[in-house]
């Protein structure tokens, strides 16, 4: 028995609704007898294919839907005014959805003439679902009709995971694996660190700057929360950004000539596969950070033979004659892992060692290094640069030079000072003068520490650094408050000075700064930073 008009035959509709195996269009879905849907507008788009029918009343439903999905709604997300309805329609159409189906007698406001007219212009189907038809009946009809397509998608999914297995077996990882996934999905795939805006893989091509900025800005506006899919306009089309499960905020960017051809489900699988590669890269970088930390600590303490030091520096890509040491004070919220990660993304050889009060990094001497440091540390943080290192055994001296220059940058209000460009205010001009100035005030305390293996100088530095706060200083020193009080009294006895006297406090402070320039950071835990 056939049907009147030019619509689908009854036999085909029965096959679609019950047997499965044939992809369904909007017009065919409307014609399924038990679905009972009808067109409000956009009948000319009846040939649009429907991959899935999903119910949602979220205002941002497109964040969770893929091209060729049919959105079913009770109308709660449909704006009441004409302009709002047209804007809502344009958002659905630009996301590549196959149509909008609204439940009768539910919560939808009256559909405006402007909305219906625009739907007809776009050939975007707007359907009505009778009150007595459950949304799940529509979903089942679509699922049955698309059984073969679902099978094809399963096969493609298996192929994606086979790419990972093949990559592991042939050590074909990194950008090569990403390229293979993109080949199978017929699009370009890129991995983006959304915190830095840099490529995650060292050999990965850079995401175009305008697109990179839009993705980062959009996620910041969402407080870093990823939707199911983030659609970003790019180069006349739309790029898709998919969240990649990772310790760092990472997105898989899919660039395609036609967004409608991008399969969101397969992209989610590709993101999961990419997550394994991202985890491998991050683990390697963390291992490199730890090894670099240990190497720099050993160099600062002169615990390496020159031959071994040169070999290990070479393993980190560092040539002593081409690098400098840079001293800085870390800003709150930043850590050495973040700095190491960003410098690694920029493929910049480096070593990092720091504590919450003071940091030092070994980098090549040049503008690229300073740009990278500025990006990672912040534009306003003062930097102090040593003279070129030259030899591994000069690391302790270079660290002191960098700290000296950093103090000068802070005191002079300059973003960067190289060693020798300008001495810090009120302090000695050379390391020799610094030793003499420190010894004049702190000599007895230094001698007492050396003789009794105590830590009075370090305790005084922490105490003054934290504005003579007994409680905070004791916490940082991991001692009882009364222990700290005893130590400060002992320092007063040894030096003949009073920590309640402003003039004496100033002398202590300047002496500590001079000793720091001569010997290194006095507030840090071991190993010291030079």
Image: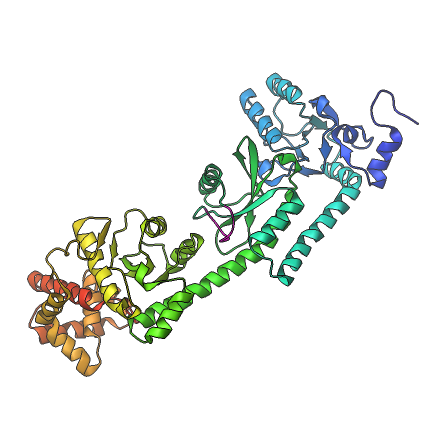
Does the magenta run of residues contain 29?
no
Q: Residue furthest right?
A: 1
Q: Is the magenta region chiefly helix, strand or loop?
A: loop
The location of residue 118, given as percent across then percent down, is 62, 20
Left or right of 482 in this view: 100: right
Q: Residue at x 60, y 38 (%)?
A: 256
Does the magenta run of residues contain 201?
yes
Name the foreground residue: 355 vs 307. 307
Whether residue 466 is visible, yes or no, is no
The location of residue 429, given as percent across then percent down, is 12, 60
Quadrant location of the C terminus in the rendered image: bottom left
The location of residue 259, given as percent across then percent down, is 62, 35
Q: Residue furthest bottom?
A: 451
Left or right of 119 in this view: 525: left
Q: Residue at x 61, y 19 (%)?
A: 112
> Looking at the picture, does residue 177 appear above or below residue 395?
above
Q: Residue at x 83, y 27 (%)?
A: 8
**Which of the 4 quarters of the picture holds residue 94?**
top right
The location of residue 224, given as percent across then percent down, is 47, 46
Quadrant location of the N terminus in the rendered image: top right
**Which of the 4 quarters of the picture holds residue 490?**
bottom left
> Looking at the picture, does residue 124 appear above or below residue 372?
above
Q: How many marks?
A: 0
- The stretch in magenta equals 198-205
Left or right of 500 in this view: 384: right
């Amino acid at each position: 028995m056939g049907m009147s008009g030019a619509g689908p035959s009854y036999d085909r509709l029965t096959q679609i609704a019950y047997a499965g195996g044939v992809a369904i269009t909007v017009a065919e879905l409307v014609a399924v007898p038990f679905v009972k849907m009808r067109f409000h507008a956009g009948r000319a788009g009846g040939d649009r294919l429907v991959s899935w029918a999903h119910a949602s009343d979220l205002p941002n439903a497109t964040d969770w839907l893929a091209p060729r999905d049919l959105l079913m709604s009770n109308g709660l997300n449909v704006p009441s005014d004409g302009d709002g309805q047209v804007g809502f329609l344009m958002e659905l159409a630009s996301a590549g959805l196959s149509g909008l189906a609204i439940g009768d007698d539910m919560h939808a406001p009256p559909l405006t003439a402007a909305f219906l007219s625009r739907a007809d212009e776009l050939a975007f189907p707007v359907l009505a679902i009778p009150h007595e038809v459950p949304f799940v009946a529509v979903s089942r009809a679509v699922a049955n009709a698309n059984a073969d397509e679902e099978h094809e998608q399963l096969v493609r999914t298996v192929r994606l995971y086979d790419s990972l297995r093949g990559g592991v077996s042939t050590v074909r990882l990194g950008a090569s694996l990403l390229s293979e996934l993109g080949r199978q999905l017929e699009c370009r795939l890129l991995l983006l660190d959304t915190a830095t805006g840099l490529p995650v893989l060292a050999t990965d091509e850079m995401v175009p700057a305008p697109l990179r900025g839009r993705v980062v800005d959009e996620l910041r506006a969402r407080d870093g929360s990823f939707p199911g899919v983030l659609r970003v306009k790019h180069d006349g089309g739309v790029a898709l950004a998919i969240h990649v499960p990772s310790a760092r905020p990472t997105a898989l960017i899919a660039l395609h000539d036609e967004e409608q051809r991008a399969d969101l489900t397969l992209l989610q699988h590709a993101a999961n596969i990419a997550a394994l590669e991202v985890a491998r890269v991050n683990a390697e970088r963390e291992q490199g950070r730890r090894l670099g930390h240990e190497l720099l600590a050993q160099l600062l303490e002169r615990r390496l033979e020159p031959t071994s030091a040169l070999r290990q520096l070479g393993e980190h890509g560092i040539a002593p004659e081409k690098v400098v040491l840079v001293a800085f004070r870390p800003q709150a919220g930043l850590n050495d892992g973040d700095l190491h990660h960003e410098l690694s993304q920029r493929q910049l050889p480096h070593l990092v060692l720091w504590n919450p009060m003071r940091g030092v990094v070994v980098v090549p001497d040049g503008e690229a290094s300073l740009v990278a440091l500025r990006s990672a540390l912040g534009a306003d943080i003062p930097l102090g640069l040593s003279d070129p290192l030259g030899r591994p055994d000069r690391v302790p001296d270079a660290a002191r030079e960098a700290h000296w220059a950093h103090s000068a940058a802070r005191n002079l209000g300059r973003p960067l000072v190289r060693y020798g460009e300008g001495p810090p205010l009120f302090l000695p001009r050379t390391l020799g003068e610094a030793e003499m100035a420190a010894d004049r005030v702190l000599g007895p305390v230094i001698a007492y520490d050396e003789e009794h293996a105590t830590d009075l100088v370090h305790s005084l530095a922490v105490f003054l650094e934290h504005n003579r706060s007994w409680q905070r200083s004791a916490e940082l020193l991991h001692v009882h408050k009364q222990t700290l009080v005893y130590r400060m009294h002992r320092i007063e006895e040894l030096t003949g000075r009073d920590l309640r006297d402003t003039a004496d406090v100033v002398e202590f402070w300047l002496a500590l700064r001079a000793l720091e320039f001569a010997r290194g950071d006095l507030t840090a835990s071991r190993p010291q930073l030079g």
